[in-house]
Amino acid sequence: MMEHPRKQEWTVVRCDGFDDMRDQNIRFWQSLGGAEIRRAAWELVTDYWHANKLPLDELRFSRSVTAVRRT
């Protein structure tokens, strides 16, 4: 079984209820910063793509507008 690459960084926190769990979750993500949040979001996107066997080429930026003119 493959171990999660950041498992050594995991912290166990006891929560008294769902509101406490929600607050802890918010504090966790706010402590990471924007770059780490975007990295985690992109990881979710690529995991979804792999799980659904979609072509990874669709994840690249596409140029759909070739020219813009003012009239």
Image (cartoon, rainbow, N blue to C red):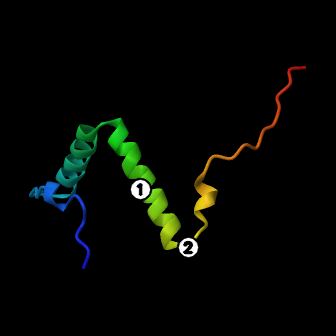
Identify the residue under disc 1. Answer: 43
Residue 58 as seen in the image, left or right of residue 32: right
Residue at x-position 27% and y-position 39% = 30
Looking at the image, residue 4 lies above or below residue 27: below
Q: Is mark 1 in CB contact (under 8 Å) with mark 2?
A: no
Quadrant for the N terminus in the image: bottom left
**Amino acid type shown at disc 2:** Lys
Residue 36 as seen in the image, left or right of residue 28: right
Q: Residue 14 placed where, x, y %?
A: 9, 58
Residue at the farthest top position: 71
Q: Which mark is residue 64?
A: none
Q: Residue 22 placed where, x, y %?
A: 24, 51
Quadrant for the C terminus in the image: top right
**Residue toward you, 13 or 61:** 61
Q: Residues within 10 Å of mark 2 (few under 14, many from 20)?
A: few
**Residue toward you, 6 or 13:** 6
Q: Which mark is residue 53?
A: 2
Sequence-first disc among 1 and 2 = 1
Q: Secondary structure at mark 2?
A: loop
Q: Residue 15 placed where, x, y %?
A: 12, 56
Residue at the farthest right position: 71
Residue 57 as seen in the image, left or right of residue 38: right
Looking at the image, residue 14 lies above or below residue 70: below
Q: Secondary structure at mark 1?
A: helix
Q: Residues within 10 Å of mark 1 (few under 14, many from 20)?
A: few
Residue at x-position 62% and y-position 59% = 57
Residue at x-position 52% and y-position 65% = 49
**Amino acid type shown at disc 1:** Glu
